[in-house]
């Protein structure tokens, strides 16, 4: 076998196969991602290795507390590349993220051991991103047909395979994912330091003062998107009345989103993907 054939085969197994005709752009929601994103961050950081790794990261250039706009751009660009990018886009962005992640690891004496390059932690983060994606879709638009849901699930493995998660680490199907998810909830443990850090992010303490006017709404939406286990871990209360308000709001936003042209529905993911490609051509940093 030639080297080129071996390389081609290796490239093909990084991502899971997705049925022909599936178009991820039909399921990307810029509006939904902004609403559900903070809750997803809480879910990801609920595993101690992820929470302490992010909170104690020595990469100040990418700190959400110190450079929130840059961190937001990097996060949305990663999601855009993972969901909508080409193989070349994912390879280029992986290289840049790896350079940052390689600097994130626990030091002697820290109470939690972590390493950002750990495929197991990345699989959990990818699982949270998939859970949040399908949860957002169902809350705004209702359940997907089975075949479409299966294709979406396979495609969302790229949340992890775009970094170090091997394709075989992604649960084989949606039923296997449900089992993985339930088992993984046993590791949810948000200590007071991480909870305080997450509430600072959720109440926009890392942004200039005018942005904080949106904090009460953001806390409401974030609490609504969190499953009960995560709400309890964060000490967030939630009532039936709030649930009804939350459900009505998302159904209304779903109706609005369905009449928008695709270019607006997927904004700003299309913008950040184009920005990443331009940066790459100009030789500018991607993260």
Image (cartoon, rainbow, N blue to C red):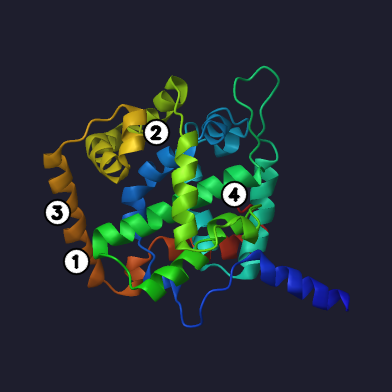
Q: Is residue 29 above or below residue 45?
A: below
Tag 3 residue: 248
Give the x, y percent position of residue 279. Answer: 60, 60
Nearest the eye: 40 or 131: 131
Residue ranking furthest to the bottom: 21
Q: CA distance from mark 2 to mark 3?
A: 26 Å
The residue positioned 56% from the left and 61% from the top of the image is 158
Sequence order check: which comes first, mark 2 or mark 4? 2
> Distance from label 4 to label 3 (Cα)?
37 Å
Residue 224 location (% of width, % of height): 25, 43
Question: Which residue is most to the left?
Answer: 241
**Is 51 located above or below residue 150 in the figure?**
above
Q: CB under 8 Å between callouts 1 and 3?
A: no
The mark lying in front, picked from 1 and 2, is 1
Q: Which mark is residue 287?
A: 4
Residue 28 is at least partly visible in this image: yes
Residue 255 has which mark?
Answer: 1
Residue at numbered disc 2:
201
- Answer with mark 2 or mark 3, whichever residue precedes in sequence: 2
Pointers 2 and 4 in contact (C-beta within 8 Å) = no
Q: Secondary structure at mark 4?
A: loop
């Amino acid at each position: 076998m030639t080297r080129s054939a071996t390389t081609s085969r290796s490239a093909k197994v990084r991502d899971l196969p997705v049925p022909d005709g599936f178009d991820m752009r039909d399921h990307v929601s810029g509006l939904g991602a902004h609403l559900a994103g903070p809750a997803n961050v809480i879910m990801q950081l609920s595993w101690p290795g992820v929470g302490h790794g992010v909170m104690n990261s020595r990469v100040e250039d990418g700190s959400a507390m110190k450079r929130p706009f840059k961190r937001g751009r990097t996060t949305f660009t990663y999601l855009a590349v993972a969901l909508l990018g080409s193989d070349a886009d994912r390879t280029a962005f992986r290289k840049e993220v790896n350079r940052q992640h390689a600097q994130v690891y626990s030091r002697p004496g820290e109470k939690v051991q972590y390493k950002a390059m750990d495929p197991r932690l990345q699989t959990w983060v990818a699982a949270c991103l998939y859970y949040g994606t399908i949860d957002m879709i169902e809350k705004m638009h209702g359940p997907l047909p089975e075949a479409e849901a299966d294709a979406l699930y396979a495609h969302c493995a790229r949340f992890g395979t775009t970094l170090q998660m091997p394709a075989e680490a992604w649960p084989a199907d949606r039923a296997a994912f449900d089992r993985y998810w339930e088992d993984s909830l046993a590791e949810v443990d948000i200590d007071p330091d991480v909870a305080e850090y997450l509430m600072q992010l959720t109440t926009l303490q890392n942004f200039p003062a005018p942005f904080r006017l949106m904090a009460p709404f953001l806390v409401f939406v974030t609490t609504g998107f969190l499953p009960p286990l995560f709400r309890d871990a964060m000490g967030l209360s939630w009532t039936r009345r709030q649930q009804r308000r939350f459900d009505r709001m998302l159904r209304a936003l779903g109706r609005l989103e369905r009449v928008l042209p695709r270019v607006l529905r997927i904004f700003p993911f299309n913008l950040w993907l184009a920005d990443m490609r331009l940066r790459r051509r100009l030789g500018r940093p991607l993260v």
